[in-house]
Image (cartoon, helix red, strand yellow):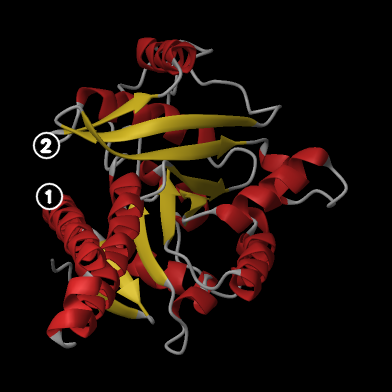
Amino acid sequence: MTDNIIITMLGTTGAGKTCFMVGMYAVMQLGVHGFTLSAQDLDEDIELSDKWEQLSDGGEDRFPPGTSATHNYAFNFNYGFRKLMGFEWLDYRGGALSDKQDKADVQELQKSLGQSSCIFLCISGEHLSTKIGSDAIRRAKNIGINRMNQFLSKLHEEKGPVPVVIAITKYDLCLHREAEEIRDDIKKLFTGLFASSEKWLVTICPVSLGKGLAGDMSHAEIDPVNLHLPLVFAIYSQLTQYAAYAKDQESSIGKKITDMTTKNRFKRWLNSDEITKANEELRKNQALANEVQDKLALLSKELGRAKIYFRGEEQEINV
């Protein structure tokens, strides 16, 4: 397994990227069913905790200002305070999504995307408060979908499909609508991600800091909803790939051992050291595979209420 995977979130100015990250960190610090989150840098822990405290306290200045400079955060995703996986999270100014490529932060964003194991698309609920009709092009522009599609197209060309989270932030702004109707609108806006011929693994996840924030934002209570689920999906997707790799390795090592042990006795004696090493490698690989499978079983329980799609078809989480 790698030390850190990379998660990149795409979203325009005002889409709530920073608030989502701050809220996700606060919720996962307390933990959800044994899963916790910790910053790898203690100074970043203090910074994010202070921002959450400001959000929770209320007042006119409760929301952090828009991000003006790119910053890369590093976190550990844990179970029972034991690290399951590390990941990096790029926080950048929303304007970088639509700026020209000669800007330094645009280049950094593109680099992060090319290395990402999972992409989060941040869509503000204000753009989904009513059903999408003939105004689809206008709404897509406001959401930044055209630019997102450009980035996803380049990613597909260079790396192939990666897991994608469509996070509907500020979900309280469209809470009055039926969830299925909102998902249908999302599918209309991102038709490429739901194409039956392509291997995009996608989840649509509503997230919110709480109801009432659309009104008197200075006094509304913070009551987080689903802020941990996008991250759980990202980690689950990566562990699934690890499990597939471990299975392939087990098959390859097993074949190597079979080839060496089916030769005549003299050849087996000559290869005895190699056979011992291969058996030890096989045991380690099987232990890793079992550990990954246990982690997947834990995460699958959390993802049971998420809507996940592959090749445009809704999927059930099985381990």
Q: In the image, is 197 to the left or to the right of 289?
A: right
Residue 304, image x, y percentages? 15, 59
User: Residue tagged by mark 2?
Assistant: 33
* Residue 58 picture location, percent across and down: 40, 13
Q: Up-down: is 144 above or below 208?
A: below
Residue at 55% in and 42% down: 15
Q: Is residue 46 above or below residue 298?
A: above
Q: Nearer the viewer, residue 192 or 208?
A: 192
Disc 2 + disc 1, Cβ < 8 Å: yes
Q: Nearer the viewer, residue 191 or 102?
A: 102
Q: Position of residue 208 (x, y in %)?
A: 35, 39
Residue 178 seen anywhere in this rendered image of the structure: no
Q: Judge by depth and name the residue closer to the eye, 141 or 313.
A: 313
The amino acid marked with disc number 2 is: His
Instruction: Name the secondary structure under disc 2.
Output: loop
**Amino acid at pointer 1:** Leu
- Label 1 sits on residue: 298
Question: Hey, which quadrant is residue 319 in on the image?
Answer: bottom left
Neighbours of disc 1 within 10 Å: few (<14), some (14-19), many (20+): some
Residue at (55% x, 20% y) in the render: 64
